Amino acid sequence: MPYVMVPVPEEHVLKVMATVLRLAARQSHDEPPKGWDQQAVTEFFGKANGPTRGLLSFLAHSQRAGNECIPPDIANALQLETSEVSGLLGPLNREFRRANRVPLLESRVHPETSRTGRTLKRRRLMMGEENARMVRAAEQALRQVEPGQLTGRAR
C-alpha cells in the first residue's frame, strides 16, 4: 500500500492522528453489514451490561416483538430514567457499526403534533420477530449459565 504525505499544521497533528486512527479502526464499508445468527446474538447479549440486556429483553418479549414501544414505557418497566433508555441507544448503535452488523432493533423518530400545535419528535423502538426470538434464546442461555442475572436496575 503506497503512502501519501499530507502537510498538517503542527498545532493540529494530534487531532489529525486521532482522526486517522479512528477511521482506520472502522471496518471497511465496502462490505454490507451482516445479519444476526443465534451464536452472534448469544455472544452479544452475554457481553452486554444489565441495562442493555434489559432493553433488548423488553423489546424481545413475545407480546412486544414487532410492536413499537416508547422510551417512557421501557424506562418504567426497567426502573430506569427515560434519558437512560435514550442513552443506551448510542453505544448500542456504535457497537452494531463496529461489528459491521445490522441493528438488532429499530429506532425511529416520528413527528407528532401536540395539542398546542407544536411539532414534537417522538422516538419509537421496535425489534423484529426473528431478532426477538434469538434474543429470547440468548436470555434463556444466559439464565442457565448465570442464574439470577438481573436486567435493568433495581430500585
Image (cartoon, rainbow, N blue to C red):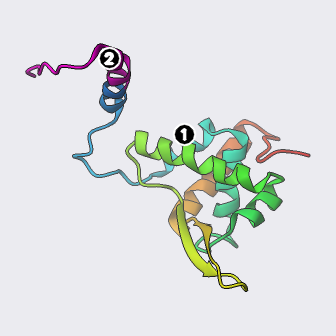
Residue 143 placement, left or right of 87: right
Q: Is residue 149 visible?
A: yes
Q: Earlier in the sequence, mark 1 or mark 2?
A: 2
Is there a contact, CB below 8 Å, between mark 1 and mark 2? no
Residue closer to the observer: 70 or 9:
9
Taking 46 as reference, is 69 above or below it?
A: below
- Residue pointed to by mark 2: 13
Query: Which secondary structure lies at badge 1?
Result: helix
Q: Position of residue 78 (x, y in %)?
A: 79, 54
Q: Residue furthest left?
A: 2
Q: Nearer the viewer, mark 1 or mark 2?
A: 2
Instruction: Residue 7: say if magenta.
Output: yes
Q: 146 or 153, which lies in front?
A: 153
Instruction: Give the residue drawn at x 73%, y 86%.
Output: 115
Q: CA distance from mark 1 to mark 2?
A: 38 Å
Q: Is residue 141 left or right of residue 19?
A: right
The correct choice, above or below, for 126 with respect to 19 in the image is below
Within 10 Å of disc 2 (Cα), the crowding (few <14, some 14-19, many 20+) is: few
**Nearest the camera: 91 or 50?**
91
Q: Which residue is mark 1?
A: 43
* Image location (x, y in percent) of residue 145: 70, 37
Give the SS element for disc 2: helix
Q: Residue at x 58, y 62 (%)?
A: 132
Give, as a single range, the part of the protein colored magenta.
1-18
